[in-house]
Image (cartoon, rainbow, N blue to C red):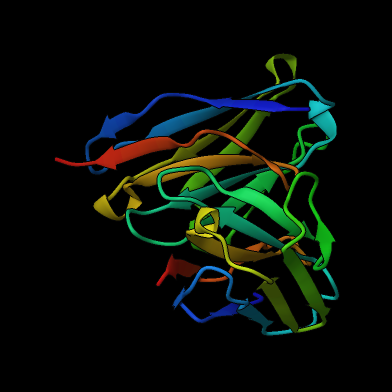
């Protein structure tokens, strides 16, 4: 059984960056695929990218390449997603998904001037 | 990239009705497809993986089928607890994609 805990809600200005964390408790973290999924208000789920901590090379949805970075810290079993040059359309709940079944509680990121 | 077309976008049915949701892939994804349920204000939950395998603890009224490009999620007898949005997710390539979602309401 894996428990997933994400960092808390954040409010950012347009043009700034945000970094959201996802910590896993239990399981063999380093071998799991960890994905980031976001959901804008009233909209559907959108896969952003993922990483296998043991391998370390992330892959990204084409829409997010160049503006999003996913990293993993094996020592703390934590994965991060950083989104740069934020705009209002990035206002969303950001979810961490470990393997196919373990979801974090979600982190609301609000981009507002 | 593989596009997932999910239909309908919403539906309203009575308790006890059979409900069918479809996902079509723009190319062959074999059985690399999962289905998720998302209740309002909550994180999604895995229902079905590998197109037709029922995730542990999921009621047997949920059934998934299909392979290749056409997939179906069936709720055999709709219950009030099933009010939620449902999403398919293809994981065939390293570029995962979700369907647009289906919102299920009770008549």
Q: Is residue A58 visible?
A: no
A28, B15: nearer the viewer: B15
- Quadrant in the rendering for residue A19: top left
User: Residue A43: x, y in percent?
Assistant: 38, 61
Q: Is residue A31 above or below residue B61?
A: above
In the image, farthest residue toward the left: A113
- A39 over A112 or under it: above or below: below
Residue farthest top in this picture: A75
Q: How many marks?
A: 0
- Which residue occupies 50% across, 52% down? A66
Of A98 and B35, the residue lying toward us: B35
Q: Position of residue A61 (x, y in %)?
A: 58, 59
Q: State the image coordinates of residue A20 (x, y, percent, origin top left).
A: 47, 31
Q: Quadrant of the C terminus of chain B?
A: bottom left
Left or right of B20 in this view: A107: left
- Residue at 52%, 41% in the rendered image: A95
* Quadrant in which the N terminus of chain B is drawn: bottom right
Q: Residue at x 34, y 38 (%)?
A: A109
In-front residue for pair B103/A67 = B103
Q: Is residue B77 left or right of residue A31?
A: left
* Whether residue B88 is situated above or below residue B49 in the rendered picture: below
């Amino acid at each position: 059984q894996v428990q997933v805990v994400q960092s808390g809600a954040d409010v950012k200005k347009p043009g700034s960056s945000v970094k959201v964390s996802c910590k896993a408790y239990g399981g063999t973290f380093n071998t799991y695929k960890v994905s980031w999924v976001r959901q804008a208000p009233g909209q559907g789920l959108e896969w952003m990218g993922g990483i296998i901590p043991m391998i370390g090379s992330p892959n990204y949805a084409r829409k997010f390449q160049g503006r999003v970075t996913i990293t993993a810290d094996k020592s703390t079993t934590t994965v991060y997603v950083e989104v740069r040059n934020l705009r209002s359309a990035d206002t969303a709940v950001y979810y961490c998904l470990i393997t196919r079944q373990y979801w974090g509680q979600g982190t609301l990121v609000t981009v507002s001037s | 990239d593989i596009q997932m077309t999910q239909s309908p976008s919403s539906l309203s049915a009575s308790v006890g009705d059979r409900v069918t949701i479809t996902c079509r892939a723009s190319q062959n994804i074999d059985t690399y497809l999962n289905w998720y349920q998302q209740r309002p204000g909550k994180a999604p939950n895995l229902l079905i993986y590998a197109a037709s395998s029922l995730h542990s603890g999921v009621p047997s009224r949920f059934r998934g089928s299909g392979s290749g490009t056409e997939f179906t999620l069936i709720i055999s007898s709709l219950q009030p607890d099933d009010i939620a949005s449902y999403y398919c997710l293809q994981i065939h390539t390293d570029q995962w994609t979700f369907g647009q979602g289906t919102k299920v309401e009770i008549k």
